Image (cartoon, rainbow, N blue to C red):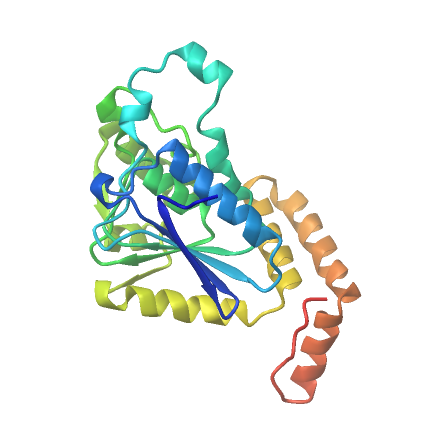
Amino acid sequence: MELENLIFKKANKIATITLNRPKFLNALCDQLIKEINYVLDLLSKDDEVHVVILKGSHKAFAAGADINEMKDLKLISHIKKDFIKPWEKISKFKKPIIASVAGYALGGGCEIAMMCDVIIAAKNAKFGQPEINLGTIPAAGGTQRLVKSVGKSKAMELVLSGSTINAEEALNYGLVSKVVPLEDLDKETINLAKNIANKSLPILILAKEAILRSFESTLSEGMINERRLFQSTFELEDRKEGMMAFLEKRPPKFKNN
């Protein structure tokens, strides 16, 4: 597939997907989502890539869904074709994804950032779910993931008022993991990606699965799943290598098996 709305590159076990619709503040059109999914399909089969970075421009991570594509839709259109469903591939991707957010992350932009595993924000980042101002509501997890990140009361405020929060507020509410100056955003994101990329890929996948399960199950069910995943690591050579390297006081040499 020819990438018209993305810039894609990979190096040193890290893949970077850059949203590239500058005239539309990276609004999430159908073609852009198709291109993201195409690249994620490639990366899911590429054992040389351990971690993915999803980013936009300094002005906008993504300002939301493409309103031009939605304005004339009817209920029957959604019944026949749920255009939001393809977005979910981001949340179901097995490898770690870091959202590197500068500028606007609104509506669908905020939602796809929340689908990622870690959000690092520049100081100029703005987060929000302004769909209420358009006479509708969030549809890609904005009423669900936001509650789990910032709590019921703040999620209610953001969704019902359509207001935004800045990066520091997002950090205080637990929506993002770190806030850095805009000029340091790429460096900080790459540093984290390198740290993650040096780990065993199958172990990264299992660790991510265990954490995500906590969002979708009770504590007791999550604990059972965690224990089973932990036990399964003892069939991996990388688990043995990691423990032997610790005992021998040397860096581990993981081989993804």
Q: Can residue 240 be spotted in the picture?
A: yes
- Quadrant where the C terminus is found in the figure: bottom right
Compared to 146, does 174 lie above or below? Answer: below
Name the residue furthest right.
235
Q: Nearer the viewer, residue 10 or 77?
A: 10
Residue ID at (31%, 48%) = 20
Compared to 239, does 128 lie above or below? Answer: above
Q: Nearer the viewer, residue 96 or 217?
A: 96
Q: Nearer the viewer, residue 238 or 218?
A: 238
Compared to 241, does 155 lie above or below? Answer: above
The number of numbered discs placed on residues in the rendered structure image is 0
Q: Is residue 184 left or right of residue 78?
A: left
Q: Is residue 94 left or right of residue 146?
A: right
Q: Quadrant of residue 192?
A: bottom left
Residue 249 screen position, x and y as percent: 63, 89
Residue ID at (28%, 27%) = 67
Q: Is residue 222 left or right of residue 145?
A: right
Residue ID at (50%, 48%) = 39
Q: Nearer the viewer, residue 84 or 244?
A: 84
Q: Is residue 86 left or right of residue 189?
A: right
Q: Can residue 147 be spotted in the picture?
A: no
Residue 120 screen position, x and y as percent: 35, 58
Residue 226 screen position, x and y as percent: 67, 53
Q: Quadrant of residue 25?
A: top left
Residue 225 screen position, x and y as percent: 69, 49
